[in-house]
Image (spheres, rainbow, N blue to C red):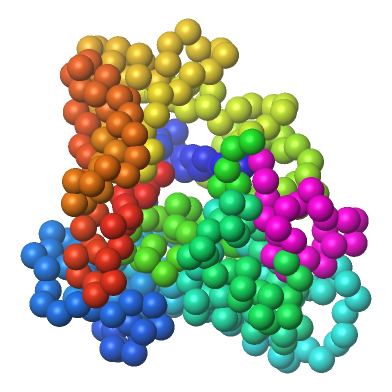
Amino acid sequence: MNLILRITISGLLLAAAAGCSGEQTVEEENWEEAGMEPEGPEGPGIGKADNMSSWPAVAPLPEGCPNAGFTPLFTPDDPTTTLELREIDRVRKARQEDDTEYAEGKNPYRIRYAVYNLSHKTILNRLTTAESEGVDVQVLIEADQLHKEWHVVAKYFRDAGLEVVYDHDDLTEETRYTADLVGIKEKGLMHLKTRLFSAPGEVTLLTGSLNPNNSAGANEENLHFIRNPGLLSAYAEAFNAQIEGRNMQNLWQDGEPVNVMFSPVKSGERAVDRLLQWVEEEDEQILIMVFSLRDLTGPGHADSLVDILARKHDEGVPVAVITDRKQSDGVDMYGSKVFWDDRTDDKLREAGVPVYEAVNDASAYFSEPYPYAAMHHK
């Protein structure tokens, strides 16, 4: 399952500035907590955190931040890990102050993750600790990730005595709600990025491109902190549909400042149709920044995304695209072949559309190399 967010103010699609950046200092022990150690001399640096001489993901949160209904954060500049740990600990603290024993399925203290993968050891430790303290923790993850040699999430959960189900098709009506870690097998990827933190009186959500991984803070990523009731309800419904194995139906609400759409859906509007519609209708500027640049088609559209972008360029609409070089040319920061060479970027260039291929070299600043660091925005 995937998703698309559209933020609308006065009819315009806007990209909001990060709400939690600012002057931050990072203690040396936070590097260890982040799962990394700096290698030595600072790199050349292009942006404020690009030389990775500090680890902003675990920096302190600025006072009072975030506090809005919708707050976007961006790595490597913002304290995304600090925020995620804060939300876990908020639910833990609330549970510690309530000694009520709740029946299965009735616990109001809940943490629900639906993520592609999960490897950040501090986050894993906090989640398993929360479960031991009486918080109802459930993690849905792409099933293939549970069988990777380097992936530690299943071992963490098993060692903590928690219930692991490797394939959601093996769930029973009982284990569907008692299982703590569930592998989701689908035709595509389980790519929903949803972290819901629930305690009486407050529910919050983290979503966006960022996976809770050790090295993700070195990527160019986005993470959205959400308190908006409508969005909270939509994401909770998406989580429930995933664990219950039922179809989603997108509900578009005109006039709302933020709408969210999920894919795949069996009925209702499809995200790809909205995307192609917006691009077809745009006459001022089109800026696209995606990890994986691929052509899109929709049954209600005669032209594909590449065709539409080429036509918009010919009509004089400024169009620019940023993508990750590994995904476009199939080579990593060292020039080594890691994927196939996709030609979507080449087709756009042939049509005159500028395409910029980003190379994330953050791994150069760590003693342990991370050749798969990426420009991972959506």
Q: Camera-side residue: 100 or 176? A: 176
Image point (44%, 33%), residue name:
11
Count all numbered tags in the image, as a single digit. Answer: 0
**Residue 233 lies in the magenta stretch:** no
Task: Point out the residue furthest to the front here.
Answer: 149
Vertically, is 134 above or below 111?
Answer: below
- Using the rendered view, name the quadrant where residue 13 is placed: top left
Vertically, is 364 above or below 301?
Answer: below
Give the image location of residue 130, x and y in percent. Answer: 67, 81
Q: Camera-side residue: 101 or 204? A: 101
Image point (47%, 8%), residue name:
302
Give the image location of residue 123, x and y in percent. Answer: 53, 75
Task: Point out the residue furthest to the top here.
Answer: 302
Give the image location of residue 44, x and y in percent. Answer: 8, 65
- Using the rendered view, name the quadrant where residue 197 is placed: bottom right
Image point (22%, 39%), residue name:
357
The answer to whether residue 83 is left or right of residue 200 is: left
Q: Camera-side residue: 125 or 26? A: 125
Give the image location of residue 273, x and y in percent. Answer: 54, 23
Residue 226 in sight in this render: no
Q: Quadrant of the C terminus?
A: top left
Q: Quadrant of the N terminus?
A: top right
The answer to whether residue 255 is left or right of residue 365 is: right
Vertically, is 227 above or below 290?
Answer: below
Image point (26%, 83%), residue name:
25
**Residue 185 lies in the magenta stretch:** yes
The answer to whether residue 155 is left or right of residue 223 is: right
Residue 370 in sight in this render: yes
Give the magenta range. Answer: 165-186
